């Protein structure tokens, strides 16, 4: 799922709301990548991001920003997928872009998962103008992801 056309004249930051996002592949981790060219390419080198997730500790260098550590199950009736809120701060500033989030998910075992909080940043100072939500393996089967811009004050 991609969101392009970030508008620096209107918005200082963005919020993504995830509602029951279910991966096609069982035990997939839902992640986020950012773009500096309007979504033509996404930052995906092994040293693009630094991140920390409560259950994982320091995730070090990554080519994806994990939105959840415990891997989500893909059975809608038993697992429920991933739900949560992710904030993207100051993407239009030529500096590292910071992301924070909290997610709650169902595990592939059918057990209610924990909530995870995490943070990440781009390692390079750059203007970000698009984002992509994806699974580390497979695709997204169902659910809803909504992006809101936070108006400049």
Image (cartoon, helix red, strand yellow):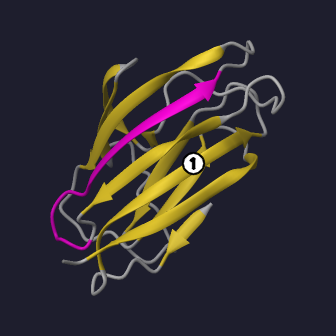
Q: Examine the rendered structure and indicate whether residue 106 appears above or below residue 100.
A: above
Give the overall secondary structure of the magenta segment.
strand
Report which quarter residue 36 is drawn in: bottom left
Residue 45 placement (x, y as % from top left) = 40, 49
Residue 65 placement (x, y as % from top left) = 41, 42
Residues packed near mark 1 inside 10 Å, few (<14), some (14 to 19) or many (20 plus): many
Q: Magenta includes 117? A: no
For numbered disc 1, what is the local secondary structure?
strand
Residue 23 placement (x, y as % from top left) = 72, 39
Location of mark 1 (residue): 18
Image quarter hosting the C terminus: bottom left
Q: Magenta includes 102? A: yes
Region rendered in magenta: 92-106
Q: Examine the rendered structure and indicate whether residue 122 appears above or below residue 4.
A: above
Residue visible at 53% across and 30% down? Answer: 104
Q: Nearer the viewer, residue 120 or 151?
A: 151
Q: Which residue of the protein is positioned furthest toward the bottom in this rendering?
A: 9
Report which quarter residue 43 is drawn in: bottom left
Position of 94 with respect to 40 (left or right) is left
Q: Which residue of the protein is positioned furthest toward the front in this rendering?
A: 153
Q: Examine the rendered structure and indicate whether residue 67 appears above or below residue 77.
A: below
Image quarter hosting the N terminus: bottom right
Report which quarter residue 116 is drawn in: top left
Residue visible at 67% across and 38% down? Answer: 137
Position of 134 with respect to 152 (left or right) is right
Numbered marks: total:
1
Residue visible at 40% across and 17% down? Answer: 55
Q: Nearer the viewer, residue 43 or 30?
A: 30
Residue 18 placement (x, y as % from top left) = 57, 48
Residue visible at 19% across and 57% down? Answer: 96
């Amino acid at each position: 799922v991609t969101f392009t056309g970030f508008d620096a004249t209107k918005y200082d930051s963005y919020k993504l709301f995830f509602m029951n996002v279910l991966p096609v592949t069982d035990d997939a981790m839902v992640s986020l990548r950012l773009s500096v060219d309007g979504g033509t390419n996404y930052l995906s080198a092994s040293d693009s991001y630094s991140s920390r997730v409560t259950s994982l500790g320091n995730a070090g260098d990554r080519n994806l920003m994990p939105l959840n550590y415990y891997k989500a199950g893909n059975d809608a009736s038993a697992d429920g997928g991933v739900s949560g809120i992710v904030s993207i701060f100051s993407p239009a500033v030529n500096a590292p872009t910071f992301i924070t989030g909290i997610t709650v998910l169902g595990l592939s075992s059918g057990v209610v998962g924990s909530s995870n909080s995490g943070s990440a940043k781009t390692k390079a100072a750059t203007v970000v103008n698009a984002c992509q939500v994806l699974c580390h393996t497979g695709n997204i089967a169902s659910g809803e992801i909504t992006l809101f811009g936070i108006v400049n004050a």
